[in-house]
Amino acid sequence: MKDISRRDFIKVGAGALALGAVAAACKPGSDKKGKGVEVSEAMPLRTNPNTGDKVSLLGYGCMRWPMVRDEAGNEVIDQEKVNEMVDYAIEHGVNYFDSAPVYLQGQSEAATAKALSRHPRNSYYIATKLSNHRGFEPTYEEGVAMYRRSLGFYDTDHIDYYLLHNIAGLAAFKQRFLDNGLMDFLLRERAEGRIRNLGFSFHGSESGLDELLALHDTYHWDFCQIQMNYVDWTHGNYSAKYAYDELVARGIPVVIMEPLLGGRLSDVPVPVAEQFKEREPSRSVASWAFRFCGTMPGVLTALSGMTYMEHLQDNVATFEHFKPLTDEELEFLEEMAGLISDYPLVPCTSCQYCMPCPYGIDIPSIFKHYNGSVNEGMIAQSTDQKNFRKLKRAYLTSYDKAIDSVRQADHCISCNSCVPRCPQGIRIPQELRRIDTYVEALKQETL
């Protein structure tokens, strides 16, 4: 485990009890669309210092809506379930909904908008993005068209929180937003009130963040979305603590993505999970990760991509009547972060940015299956193990069941098209070769 200062990890604890500005729940008023619902007042709200918005500490990340197959066999969003979960979220005080044009093969914005349109417009905040980085030419015309399509989906005259999507540093910002004139357009839209808050989602190194924050005096970033959780705080590919501290020092509200590291912090290695359960038998393992984010007073909202109703209900239960972590609990989480980091896991969050693979490989599912096997202690170490054959059979059988044979790791040719698209900086071909080598060693019994 890395030797870091525990005081650095827990120093926010003393100030965390303040929790920023927590206000009474905002009840929907009169509006031309939808009917009001009774909204729980138990969900803590943080005040955006720029606008006075009262934003729910738990936000809904709309990147992982449930999917079904339509009559033609195409994978589509299950709109009925989306409606049900949006209704439950709003009734329990969740009012921040984050989507993007590229989520779920371009289906997320329309499905999210359809579910939200059944509620008064002033009962929720829309967050979406200018995603001109995946399959889109970063031209002025395409960027403006994407922005206007978002307005059309939501049938609204303003977007509450608009993000420059997936920015890693100055070079990408210049190419995608500055040199083509898009930034000037977005600044005009903000000045005229059609964009109420303008920010960016950050996927890069500390130096890249420094480059973007150096522009704060010029563009006045209204908020910033960063990956932050108790592992990335000091044990990740970049320091979430550094990013958080730099934003707070400038008074920029922080929106959290990947508080669960793509679900990895709800499915931790068994020995780690046992320690969580020993301390809090009635709480889920995931609740610790959300409480970590909510304890930080500079956090405006923590997004969770809740696919199933049970996930939503568990997260709502964590945030209602929210209790911040104590210094001792923060120290415990630092110890758990070190243990988790010692496991040979692939740091994949299942964001799908690497997809589609030109050779049909199901990259996120391969990594998810491997990580799950490691967490459950179902990885064979050598043929001398007493239960080697049982572990071999379990891994190979579950691997074939989870991923079609034509989409498994052995089909990777190291074309590297996935590598620049990975926000985690994973050397994907190397990790696929490592997993394929392990699979072959199991089959040949050469471990």
Image: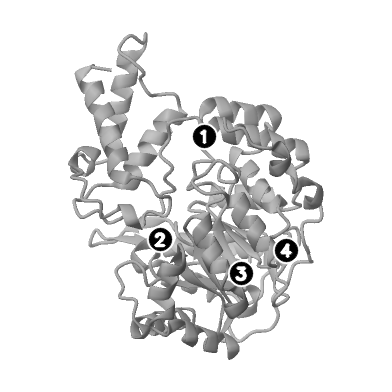
Local SS, label 2:
loop
In front: label 4 or label 2? 4
Tell me the residue that label 2 is attached to.
78
Tell me the CA gap for discs 2 and 3: 31 Å
* For marks 4 and 2 on the same chain, the one whose residue lies earlier in the sequence: 4
The residue drawn where x is 60% and y is 38% is 285
Instruction: Tell me if I can see residue 417 in this picture.
Output: yes
In front: label 1 or label 2? 1
Q: Relative to residue 325, is residue 348 drawn left or right?
A: left
The disc labelled 4 sits on which kind of residue? Leu
Tell me the residue that label 3 is attached to.
223
The residue drawn where x is 68% and y is 47% is 291
The residue drawn where x is 70% and y is 43% is 8
> Front-most of 145 and 169?
169
Tell me the residue that label 1 is attached to.
341
Local SS, label 4:
strand
Q: How many labels, in total?
A: 4
The disc labelled 1 sits on which kind of residue? Ser
Q: Quadrant of residue 97?
A: bottom right
Q: Quadrant of the C terminus?
A: top left
Tell me the CA gap for discs 1 and 2: 35 Å
Q: Quadrant of residue 214?
A: bottom right
Q: Is residue 18 above or below residue 237?
A: below
Tell me the residue that label 4 is attached to.
45
* For marks 1 and 2 on the same chain, the one whose residue lies earlier in the sequence: 2
> Looking at the image, what colour scheme do you see?
one colour
Do the numbered discs 4 and 3 sit on residues whose CB atoms are within 8 Å? no
Instruction: Tell me if I can see residue 34 in this picture.
Output: no
